[in-house]
Image (tube, coloured by chain):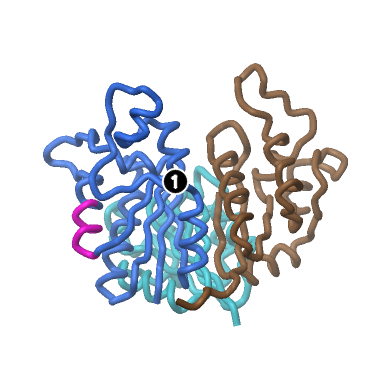
Amino acid sequence: MSNILHTVNKSPFLNQTLKHCLGRIQSGDSVLLLEDGVYAALSSQPWAMLMNPSHQYYAIKADVEARGLGEDKLLSHITLIDYEQFVELSTEHSTVQSWY
Amino acid sequence: MIFSLAIYATPSVQSSDSAYRFANALVAHNHTLYRIFFYHDGVYHGSQLNTPAQDEVDHTVRWQQFAKQHNVDMVICIASGLRRGILNSKEATRYEKSAHNLAEGFELSGLGQLVDAAVYSDRLVTFGH
Amino acid sequence: MNKPKTKKLLFLFRHAPYGSALAKEGIDAVLAASAYDQDLSVLFMDDGVFQLLKHQKPDDIEEKNIINILSAFTLYDIQSLFVCQESLAERGLRNTDIAIGINIVAHNTVSQLLSQQDHILSF
């Protein structure tokens, strides 16, 4: 079964990239937030309600910490990962789609 | 698994750094990195004239060291490169430019190298700007 | 060496023309790929649908008309061209606004296209 790892690197407050991605994900797909995309890990972000908990959501921990986003402000179903885990995720999914 | 990376981001955006970290994690996991294809604004990585401040990362040198250490093919798209002033000595002569700047370890080649990387690799990961 | 199997490659266009070189350079990548005998599809969605509009006149901004470049797809025998209906509707565009022959596809076909690929090349 094919599944996609979607990466999003834009802030959802400035850019609709996250919304575009969330509108196209399917069962088995996962979403990885990186760079300014990690602002989408905030529970206050405008499309949080579109982040259906039946998918897996990840954010690069170093990018979250660099931006001073405290864990108390983050959506609870986001898993913080490092680049080694990013590589693992890209092998566990059949394609990687970059939304930028 | 065989990976290739397509980098469209210029060195001054974080996506460039993400690509570098991803590449390092790949080789640490013993995956094969077949090719890094620099396209669009990613071609700016190939200028040996990039001169960041001393306390900042030198993206060009970092990729050169990485490619040498891990024997990775780094291709700059020739059409994108020429448009943005990334030339080797051959192209400088052809277009009668007085200087060339392609950094060692990078190769100017056609878009076919991106397609070849897609055909040959199990995963193609894009780092957009 | 074994010949690698034919790959399914989707070229995904999400950016408008002219504001950056991304659209034009993406099209160049499609044309290059057409020489490699792979299973190619091209999908325009989000702001990528703006590339398809009739009546583009980029002369005064000294750019090549993206429609002329896209027209090369026919010459290169690239036939699997798709545009996301939802993205058109969101922008108030109809099929009569589109300058090239293309399949207008609904959400479920877009999802299928995305999920069937070996690689997605996103521009």
Is residue B99 depicted above or below C110 in this figure?
above
- The cyan one among the chains is A
Local packing at callout 1 (Cα closer than 10 Å; few below 14, some 14-19, many 20+) is: many
Residue at the far left in the pictured view: B54
* Residue range corresponding to the magenta coloring: B64-70
Asked whether residue C20 is drawn in magenta, I would say no
Q: Residue at x 33, y 54 (%)?
A: B74
Q: Nearer the viewer, residue C88 or C101?
A: C101
**SS class of the residue under badge 1?**
loop
* Left-right relation of A96 to B5: right
Q: Does B94 sit left or right of C78 as displayed?
A: left
Say which residue appears at 50% left-offset and 58% top-offset: A98
The amino acid on which the numbered mark 1 sits, given as a three-letter code, is Tyr
Vertical placement of residue C52 versus C63, above or below? below
Name the quarter where the N terminus of chain B is drawn. Answer: bottom left
Q: Which chain is brown?
A: C
Left or right of C115, for residue A95: left
Task: Identify which residue, A10 or C70, lies in the foreground.
Answer: C70
Residue lying at the far right in this picture: please name it: C96
Position in image of residue A91 (x %, y %): 43, 76
**Residue B129 appears in the figure:** no
State which chain disc 1 sits on.
B
- What secondary structure characterizes most of the magenta part? helix
| Colour of chain B in the rendered structure image | blue
The residue under label 1 is B39
